[in-house]
Image (cartoon, grey):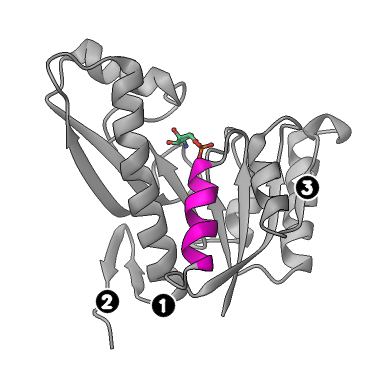
Amino acid sequence: MLKLGVLISGGGTNLQAIIDNIENGNINGKIVLIVSNRKEAYGLERGKKAGIESLYINPKDFNSHQEYNLHLIKEFKDRNVDLIVLAGYLKILSPEFIKEFKNRIINIHPSLIPSFCGDGFYGERVHKAVLDYGCKITGATVHFVDEGTDTGPIILQKCVEVAEDETVQSLQKKVLEIEHKILVEAVKLFCDKRISIKGRHVKILKED
Ligand code: GRF
């Protein structure tokens, strides 16, 4: 059974979706550590309620971004983590972290990458940009994390229609439901060893 490490910064509804799908047997994995860079992240409460080791690690306790990331690497390696899931984690990972866990870090982004992603595109800003542009569809993307921001190989995407009377809040709610679905599916596929990657191209392998 693969060991999962989850990085969060906020409410943790994506984390909760993973917890729920491990508990109901859909995901054949085990979350062994949750880390938040923000003390008030409700996701830490979600982890504790599920009996999962959940740590607030303050980046300000380290002399640099690099040292903070080296500490995160140690925390995950000490627990033999196989897959790192960024579930609403709002900090950039260091090159050392990316190298250490190459093709073993996945992120959920609330748009159809490569649209509305990259620096400055997070949370409500993404949905506001989609509405301002006048898009008719949007969605969510799960991708491997590489050295760029939201630039890694795409694993799964799913789209939703943008209604005429859509607001930022209604769209965020719609997309978040999609996020939960495809993040859970991606973690499940990874745990079942059904994701193969060649360069930028990710293939989902058929069930045995
Ligand atoms: C979601 O909008 C997700 O797309 C983005 O950060 C937010 C996290 O939500 N990565 P939650 O903390 O999982 O509820």
- The residue shown at (60%, 33%) is 10
* Disc 2: CA contacts within 10 A as few (<14), some (14-19) or many (>=20): few
The residue under label 1 is 193
Residue 121 picture location, percent across and down = 42, 24
Q: Amino acid at mark 3?
A: Leu
Question: Based on the displayed image, in which of its 4 quarters is residue 111 positioned?
Answer: top left
The residue under label 2 is 205
Q: Quadrant of the N terminus?
A: bottom right
Judge whether 144 appears above or below 131 on screen.
below
| 153 on left or right of 65 | left
- The residue shown at (62%, 35%) is 9
- The residue shown at (64%, 52%) is 97
Which stretch did the figure color magenta? 13-23
In the rendered structure, find residue 88 and report the number of the disc placed on it.
none
Q: Earlier in the sequence, mark 2 or mark 3?
A: 3
The residue under label 3 is 55
Residue 49 picture location, percent across and down = 69, 52
Relative to the observer, which residue lies in front, 86 or 174?
174
